[in-house]
Amino acid sequence: MFTGIIQAKGTLAQMIRQGEEALLTVSTDLPLDDIKIGDSIAVNGACLTVTQKKTKGFSADVSAETLAKTNLGLLKTGDSVNLEKALRLTDFLGGHLVLGHVDGLGRIVEKTVRAKSVLFTFEVPDQLMKYIVEKGSIAVDGISLTVNRCVRNQFHVNMIPHTAQGTTLGLKRVSEPVNIETDIIGKHIEKLMMNNRGGNSHVDWKLLAEHGFLR
């Protein structure tokens, strides 16, 4: 589990295809002294398991599912990636709870640089848009962001210069793909509500309203 607060950027050193899967190697100045083989690191928001440690970097296997769902398979040698080590119980939760399980790809449709911020508009598939709400949280390439506004299958965010400079989003251009992970809470509520239609759950609209989940 992660928080969506990017700790460092890395550089793709190598991507070796192994059938439908791949071995990814990242070079980075991110301190890895506390990382062991088998620990998790989010790369552009996708949770990967460290299989090798380098002097300055690491390698990880990338499954066929991850390559299909994320932009990792589109990376080229030298491309920058966002990195975050797994959350520890003693860490500050500065962003929101991010699983590192990317739901799918979105794309940048508009980018406006202002003096104090960068405004992004992202477009996502319809099946993901239902989980995105105004003033809710979302992870874009592993970055925890607040949704300002939703219009059809697009949402808007406002990124401060610190985040833009410390992540890959500040470098990306319009039309480039980004990894999207929606808030896990919405997906759980949807599953509970679907189960309730078959009489297998005690969760309903009345219960959600009584406990402040609905207005």
Image (cartoon, rainbow, N blue to C red):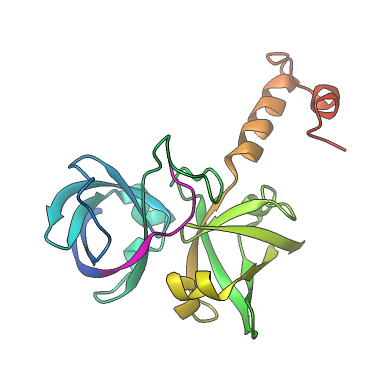
Q: Position of residue 86 (x, y in %)?
A: 36, 44
Q: Is residue 10 magenta?
A: yes
Q: Nearer the viewer, residue 57 or 202?
A: 57
Q: Is residue 209 left or right of residue 116?
A: right
Report the residue at 65% width, 58% height from top. Answer: 146
The quadrant in which the N terminus is found is top left
Magenta residues (range): 1-11
The secondary structure that most of the magenta stretch takes on is loop
Q: Is residue 63 left or right of residue 46?
A: left
Q: Is residue 178 magenta?
A: no
Report the residue at 72% width, 27% height from top. Answer: 193
Residue 122: quadrant of the picture: bottom right
Q: Position of residue 171 (x, y in %)?
A: 45, 79
Q: Is residue 136 visible?
A: yes
Residue 151, compared with residue 19, is above or below; it is below
The quadrant in which the C terminus is found is top right
Residue 45, compared with residue 120, is above or below; it is above
Residue 153: quadrant of the picture: bottom right
Q: Nearer the viewer, residue 80 or 176?
A: 80
Q: Position of residue 181 (x, y in %)?
A: 53, 51
Residue 139: quadrant of the picture: bottom right
